[in-house]
Amino acid sequence: MELYKLTVHEAVDLINKKEVTYQQIVQSALQQIHEVDKDVKAFITLTDERALEDSRQLDAIGADEEGLSVLAGIPFGVEDNICTQGVRTTCASKMLDNFVPPYSATAFSRIAQQRGVLMGKLNTDEFSMGLTTETSYFHETRNPWDLNRIAGGASAGAAAAVAADEVFYALATDTGGSLRRAAAFCGVVGLKPTYGMVSRYGVISSGSSMDQVGPIAKNVKDCALVFQAIAGRDKADPMTATARVADYVGALADDIKGLRIGLLRECFDKGIDKDVKEAVLNAAKTLEGLGAHVEEISLPSVELASAAHCVILSAEASSNLGRYDGIKYGYRVERCQDLDDLYKKTRTQGFGDEVKLRVMLGTYALSAGNYERYYLQALKVRTIIKAELEKAFEKFDAVVLPTCSTTAWKFGDKVDSAFAMFLADKYTAPASIAGVPAITIPCGFDAKGLPIGMQLMGKQFSETTLLRIAFTFEQNTDYHIKRPAIDWR
């Protein structure tokens, strides 16, 4: 078996047994990247020389060095809106094409401190705004299951790189569901933690009240390993939670007997593909057969989550993007008449159309005449959805619903349908605007052989329960084992 196909814990086992070296693991991943990324296009920046040097140093230290983490020497990637000291961080935008941050995001630093090996920075939609990577300044990322189809939006590079075995896991961000959608489209596991469980320090913000860093991995155990490493309080980010970091890996018991799971009715009524509906309902039956009590539940306000998310994200993005003025860092035009001309030309040339649209929408929603009509109403909807979910979690340990209403679509299929693109957030937005954790795992395939994702939502800080349910489902099914079968070579 090729080393790049291993999971994190499988690679660690071989390293501990001294059957492979760190260099062999990294070289295998690099070979896979050079073979397939010309088609998948998951990476914006590749750090191959750095990766090889890191692996050489680890081999020199020795695999049994005291205190060496289980993630040491394991190749991983980072979404390109997460700052990495000394490594270009572009947010897939012309505005930051030449930006090399002087500091690292906390989430990345915690992996780096454990001697994880960075393979490079992964493609995203420009400033995380979009659903297909068609807004990226550099290129589109293609789905390893079908290169004519999207791999997702802001987290597409991360999910595609994991699915194509270019990296063992990736750090990505989730604002309205990008991490979970991309993971579902690519047939891998993605976890959006409770808001505040992972530091946002060093993450280039789009929607500050919803942005959250999480792991994408090949299976649930790897996901738990990475989350264990990045979770926890950070003095650099006052919004990080004070909740205790649990033993997420130790919680992975193959047992869900007695757990109560709600099946969200509103997600199966309309607008969902037949294959997706059938796969998720069958997955719920599997959970019931494994000992969980599954019961239909209604949360009427979740239908409004996409609209509320759109308004809140646009408003926050319009504020966050104001810092890109052509003066402090990033792209800057020359030969300007005055300061206003500098601002105007820099932003006109530096931002893409989608970013400009979001800024305009956000500025409009925050204007004096529209604040109460749009932004304040969106905040009220957020409060109602949070209250509905809190009430539901008094009775249920988790809520199950589809991750997406469809499988991955072809490039260009929905580019002219604003409504269809808007509905893509329908099932992922509730967890984002409520700040609760959610995980997506593969639960089936459609008639075209494309992967389908099942999503589990839980109350705040219930990641151990969600991981336990996901792990139990995974151990009793084989959907996660099937890999993309495209002959790149």
Image (cartoon, rainbow, N blue to C red):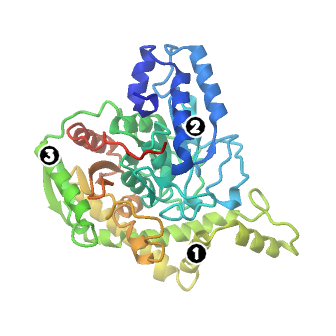
Residue located at (47% from left, 58% from top): 175
Marks 2 and 1, the one that precedes in the sequence: 2
Residue 430 spot, x, y in % from top left: 35, 63
Q: Nearer the viewer, mark 2 or mark 1?
A: 2
Disc 2 is placed on an element classified as strand
Give the quadrant of residue 410.
bottom left
Q: Amino acid at mark 1?
A: Leu
Considering depth in this image, is 321 or 377 the residue closer to the camera? Answer: 321
Gap between marks 3 and 2, in whole Å?
A: 40 Å
Gap between marks 2 and 1, in whole Å?
A: 33 Å
Label 1: which residue? 357
Considering depth in this image, is 257 or 461 the residue closer to the camera? Answer: 257
From what the image shows, is residue 51 above or below residue 56? below
Residue 138 spot, x, y in % from top left: 63, 57
Query: How many dots with numbers?
Result: 3
Label 2: which residue? 119
Residue located at (39% from left, 35% from top): 222
Label 3: which residue? 292
Gap between marks 1 and 3, in whole Å?
A: 45 Å
Residue 110 spot, x, y in % from top left: 54, 35
